[in-house]
Image: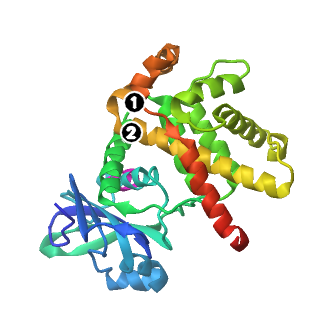
Amino acid sequence: MAFDKTKTNTKFGLLALDDCKDLAFEDTVELGEGVSIHSTCPIEVPGHWKEWLGTLETGHLQDADFLIAVQADSATPAVLDAETRAIDVRLNAHWYGLLLHGIPDYQGGVTVLGGVGAKSSLSVRQFHRVPTAYRHIFGKRLVIDTPTLASSNVCATTILDLHEKATFRRVRAGFKACIRVIEEFLAEERLHQYVRAIDGLMHIPKGPGEPVFAARGVTFAKGTDLDLILRQFYRMRNAQEHLNEFREALDAPDDDGLHHLGSRLAYQAEQLALSCYRRLFTTPALLATFESDASTDAFWKLDDAGRRALWGDPFDLDAVREEHDYRYKLLKGHV
């Protein structure tokens, strides 16, 4: 059931983005278990909250055109408690599940937590900004359509399940790196963390890591000069790790070539990392393979055919290269 502001004795949470572009779904999409997506705000902010927060803050909510809503029954709709925290966690899981598919274009975002009491009296108990999600400067915008929302819903379910587990340590750490770096603007640090997220699924033994990273990376990716690209990922990750410049890790003729190559590799690393975690979070049997260090090691001890049977088709880095280079040439003179 979609969000209902008249349903009494409930708690709710809204994560709202305003001026969100590239929406391709109907007014409301119901995802089940009290979660729904809306293209207009389903509540009116109480007058005293408008006075306390100001029109700028409340405007992000009232003018929102993409909202994730979570609603659940509650005997204490006006109280901030563990139920409220659980709703906030669910909102974040759905937001993170969407971000694994790409970064939408929007102006600002807020999270609102509240409740509906007797006689449909609505109260807002908490109001805070959503951290900005940054897209690669030459990356494509996310089109939010119903298949994307369905897939992000599956990812959110997995994220919530992992939130309750002590196992899947590497998967949780790699996913955390992906999400944190989406909120990072610096290109060098973005690449650093995305490569760490990929590396986390490999459990590379002590010793020279670069050749192992390149050898294992072919399970996840395909494309022209793949071995070189994977080695460049690893070298750039190490350069950032040790606070060195990327020019020490890349062979480029000049600064312009260095910028172009570094930008492209950063985008390829980003898209590869996100594709890995999307696949894990939407394929339960595959996710189980990475439950522990022992099970991860067992995966990498399989031959190529055995790993391919479990992982599936590798991600196409050539397609990502074409995406990046098209926008690089188009926008180079404007950034």
Residue type at mark 2?
Phe
**How is the rendered protein coloured?**
rainbow
Residue shown at 38%/26% (left/top)?
288
Q: Residue 12 appears at what percent x and percent y?
A: 27, 63
Query: What segment is highlighted magenta in the picture?
Result: 87-93
User: Dot 2: few (<14), some (14–19), or many (≥20) neighbours within 10 Å?
Assistant: many
- 75 in relation to 151, above or below: below
Query: Mark 2 touching mark 1, by CB under 8 A?
Result: yes
Furthest toward the front, the residue is 224
Residue carrying label 2: 281
User: For the stretch drawn in magenta, what is the main secondary structure?
Assistant: helix
- 85 in relation to 272, above or below: below
Residue carrying label 1: 287
Res 264 seen here = yes
- 222 in relation to 211, above or below: below
Which residue is at the front of the view, 95 or 227? 227
CA gap, disc 2 and disc 1: 7 Å
SS category of the residue bearing label 2: helix
Residue type at mark 1?
Leu
